[in-house]
Image (cartoon, rainbow, N blue to C red):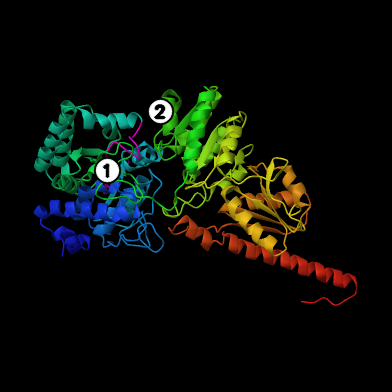
Amino acid sequence: MTLLESVRNPDELKRLPAERIPALAAEIREFLVSEVSRTGGHLGPNLGVVELTIALHRVFDSPRDPVLFDTGHQSYVHKMLTGRRDFSRLRSEGGLSGYPSRAESEHDFIENSHASTVLSYADGLAKANEVRGRAESTVAAVIGDGALTGGMAWEALNNIAECKQRRLVIVVNDNGRSYSPTMGGLADHLATLRMTPGYEHALEAAKTALNRAPVVGQPIYDALHGFKKGLKDAIQPQIMFEDLGLKYLGPIDGHDEAAVEKALRRARDYGGPVIVHCITRKGKGYAPAENHDEDQFHAPGAFDPETGQAKSSPGGGVKWTKVFSEEMVRLGAEREDLVAITAAMLHPTGLAPFAEAYPDRTFDVGIAEQHAATSATGLAMGGVHPVVAVYATFLNRAFDQVLMDAALHRQGVTFCLDRAGITGTDGASHNGMWDLSILQVVPGLRLAVPRDAQRLREELREAVAVDDAPTVLRYPKGAVGEDIPAVDRIGGMDVLRSAADAGHPKDLLLVAVGAMARTCCEAADRLADEGIGATVVDPRWVKPLDPALVEEAAEHRAVAVVEDNGRVGAVGDAVARALRDAELDMPVRTFGVEQEFLDHASREAVLEKMGLTPQVLARRLMGTVSRLTDAGRSERALADGEPAQN
């Protein structure tokens, strides 16, 4: 039995002799590289928190003491130390989630993968402990320096600092990176502690001070206060947290488990809010990750563990993100007023080539989507056209700013939503299935959904040409596939299949939203084989809807809308409302994602579960047309005086 196999829960970890901890850490890293190389996943962040997570579970008594992570992708080691070692189906249907999961373990309190939230959770849990008289429980919250760039974290710190008796330990996991290097004034300030020549001396001073610090009462305040003043003299002034009235310990070498453990014990025993500042290295212990400049193997796909080289995947081909990336560079060459904004995701959203070509026109605001939206509005007011590239799920956080800042002021800001629709493997928090619903209520906003690479290029150009309203372009994760040519144009809509041209009656108008166009075309072909005529249209812009859509619907017997979004309040509902407003009394079927939090699985598996495949869609639509035909026969029979048949 290996050392790792013998540690099946936090209690067994606590009983492990301190001299065995380095060997355990080495086994954990070996396990992580071996397992994640097969499945893909968040490797770099977890290699960086091995000793830190071990120390957390040796000091705190989970689940009595909640241990929380922000963001949750750094929780793999936590899973291993709380009894979850089967990583064979990591992030796959039926396997372990890539984030904390309440369904998996009592040790997982929050299912967070949206950054900068953990301190608010921790504040609430600490307040609940106070209200319920749980005086012995301490909340431990781990937050990365990248997540600290989010304003919500500082709102929470402001509240945490107001009460000196609540037992709350905040661990700042400071590796200088979110995905890529952390940006902004806060990052620069923290970086002074990592990069100043006196850093190694400061770490040694930290260990000495911790060894000498008393455990409780006024003496620890004096010791901590004196140590902080000494640290200020040794290196750059460290006043951010102190000015909030929070006790501060650090910087600590986050890969020295004994030093981290000592710091955490003293912070726990202090009895009030304490910040423990740990310096770690993302990708620690695996050379290919440590030497990977872009993101230290933040979330690689399957790879060769010996070399770190990526393995080929079945989902090859040009990615949607790459198409957007290349077109942005072309647009940047044509328009000097075009600028780009990212919220700490320069590479994942495809803006890195634009930043390389036009560094003075690229702004990384940190993990701060709300600020990104309003800052973009200010940029537009200043005479440039900003493109804000963000994952679709993260735009949810900036809805108020899109509504009350960009839209209210009628400013030309373009939001490009990557990973829209079902993303799958990252689970409920990452599926971009909300934007087509929430954005419908924004006055003046225009929303385009490209079906293929060529349409993405065209619609991006159309979007940035708008200077009197916000525009949105949304596209999914993965490979684009071949372009889907139009056979005709009606108003601003592309006709992809024509029932009349195929010699069939106009039974059904099938409205294909974005990437669902291929599914709709295949379903229409299946219907045609059964003698049912389906006209497939791509509206291109789904807000506002083209008046031609209503006119075309009037020539058909029924309408169906298919979209990769939650069904409630999205394009299907907008089409139904437009038909009602035009007093067209006709059946409207809406197909999309059920309004629920979906478990992690592949995109294909989720779409199949939702019935968003050509086979299932064709079968359901066949039933719709069949019922219309039966109803028509019954009406004619009644008109002729014949009895209706069921």
**Residue plotted at (44% across, 48% down):** 316
Q: Is residue 150 left or right of residue 228?
A: right
Q: Report the disc number at residue 508.
A: none
Q: Tag 2: residue type?
A: Glu
Query: Which of the 4 image quadrants contains residue 222?
Result: top left
- Does residue 179 show up magenta in the picture? yes
When the figure is inspected, residue 196 is found, relative to residue 179, above or below; the finding is: above
Where does label 1 land, which residue? 289
Please name whichever residue, 244 or 617, is drawn nearer the observer in this view of the structure.
Answer: 617
**In this orientation, does residue 492 appear?**
yes
Lower sequence index among marks 1 and 2: 1
Please name whichever residue, 390 or 441, is drawn nearer the observer in this view of the structure.
Answer: 390
Query: Badges 1 and 2: C-beta atoms under 8 Å apart?
Result: no
When the figure is inspected, residue 190 is found, relative to residue 550, above or below; the finding is: above
Please name whichever residue, 520 or 84, is drawn nearer the observer in this view of the structure.
Answer: 520
Task: Give, as a single range, the part of the protein colored magenta.
Answer: 162-183
Q: Quadrant of the C terminus?
A: bottom right
How far is mark 1 from mark 2, CA to CA?
23 Å
User: Mainly helix, strand or loop, the magenta region?
Assistant: loop
SS at mark 1? Answer: helix
